[in-house]
Image (spheres, helix red, strand yellow):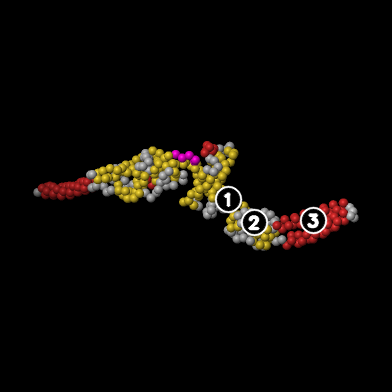
Amino acid sequence: MRAGRMIVMLAGSALVFGGVFGFIGFRDAMTKAYFASMAKPVAAVTVAKASLVEWHGVIPAVGTLQAVNGVDIAGSASGLVREIAFLSGQEVKRGQVLLRLDIDVETGDLRSAEAELALARTVHDRNKALLRSSTVSVATMEKAEAELKVHQAKVGALQAQIAKKTVTAPFDGVLGVSKVDLGQYLQTGQTIVNLQDLSSMLCDLTVSQKDLAVVEVGQPVRMRSDAWPDRVFDGTIAAIEPLVDVRTGMVAVQARFPNPDRRLRPGLFAKIEIVRPVGDKVVTVPISAVSYNLYGDAVFVVREGTAAGKPDRTVDRVVVQLGERRDGVVVVRQGIVAGDTVVTSGQVRLENGDSVRIAAEDPLELPGKNVSR
């Protein structure tokens, strides 16, 4: 009796649990079938045309900027600072007075020397008149002429010494921070202030001797600096060192960059690109169109077709071989041709063969004829 009940209970439990698990399996199978039969939504993407352009290669280099004219202004005479005629950071013109030293002692010496010069000139003129009547000898006249020249030289030396007590700007430029104070005793050669001509900048750089054949004076040069990362400065090669460094095989080159807005400053680190004179015809696409992964770089190319009698756009994942990147575009050496439409955004969830809808053209305008920056 008890064994029969056990058998009935076990059979009932098996029936209940079998029904539950059967229902779960049926539910999962129906769910899979439902999702498998659902049509994948059409993805919205932006696109751009692959363009055939003339691409000018570049020779990369690094350098440091310096002003065309830049100097630490120092006094050529010593003395007490009587007047400071400039402000730190001020723009000055050539010949503008910057500083005056005390000249009281030199002025007194100059007046004494001028008095002696006047006396020597009087004696000289008198002896010259007397020489005509043979009242004085030729030797006396020659001595008077020598004394006149000595006093003239003395006056000239004192005037030059006084002139050195006034410091002027040697060229147009912008002053740095003043390094002197009013009433300070200035030593000969002591720095007063730094002066830089910021109208244009020079950049010293080096290139390999293997590139010497394609580098010449007047060739275009582009520069970027960490101080202005979003701006490209255009310049030209100003000079090429005629001597190749035998230890490194490098050639010194100097480039010149206009600086009308004074943004470039001496001492800035610069990244230089020397534009090669001859360009190649290459296919370019926006950098955003490229998907990078371990299996190779690829782009999604839009293909035009029909589905159920209606126009349909699908995408093919094409593996590409890339070249140089510059200013938002990249060279495609192999994989696509000019005129292909590539997806530039929205490709993260795309798979090969997916249908797409073009939401907008890519706002990046690719150059049509020439790429040199």
x, y percentage for residue 199?
A: 56, 52
**Distance in Å between CA atoms under marks 2 and 1:** 19 Å
Residue 192 visible in the displayed image: no
90 is higher (above) or lower (below) than 322? below
* Magenta part of the chain: 276-280
Q: Which type of secondary structure does the marked residue at label 1 adopt?
A: strand
Task: Give the total of numbered labels.
Answer: 3
Q: Residue at x 39, y 46 (%)?
A: 286
In this rendering, position of residue 24 left or right of residue 58: left
x, y percentage for residue 101?
A: 68, 60
- Magenta span contains residue 254: no
Residue 100 visible in the displayed image: yes
Q: Dot 3 corresponds to which residue?
A: 151
Disc number lying in front (2 or 1): 2
Residue 199 is labelled as: none
Residue 95 is labelled as: 2
Disc number lying in front (1 or 3): 3
Q: Which type of secondary structure does the marked residue at label 2 adopt?
A: loop
Q: Image quarter for residue 355?
A: top left
The crowd level at tag 3 (other Cα within 10 Å; few <14, some 14-19, many 20+) is many
Is the stretch drawn in magenta largely helix, strand or loop?
Answer: strand
Q: Amino acid at mark 3?
A: His
**Which of disc 2 and disc 3 is earlier in sequence?**
2
**Distance in Å between CA atoms under marks 1 and 3:** 44 Å
**Which of disc 1 and disc 2 is earlier in sequence?**
1
**Distance in Å between CA atoms under marks 3 and 2:** 29 Å
Q: Amino acid at mark 2?
A: Gly
**Which of disc 3 and disc 1 is earlier in sequence?**
1
Q: Amino acid at mark 1?
A: Ala
Q: Are marks 1 and 3 in contact (CB under 8 Å)?
A: no
Q: Dot 1 corresponds to which residue?
A: 67
The crowd level at tag 1 (other Cα within 10 Å; few <14, some 14-19, many 20+) is many
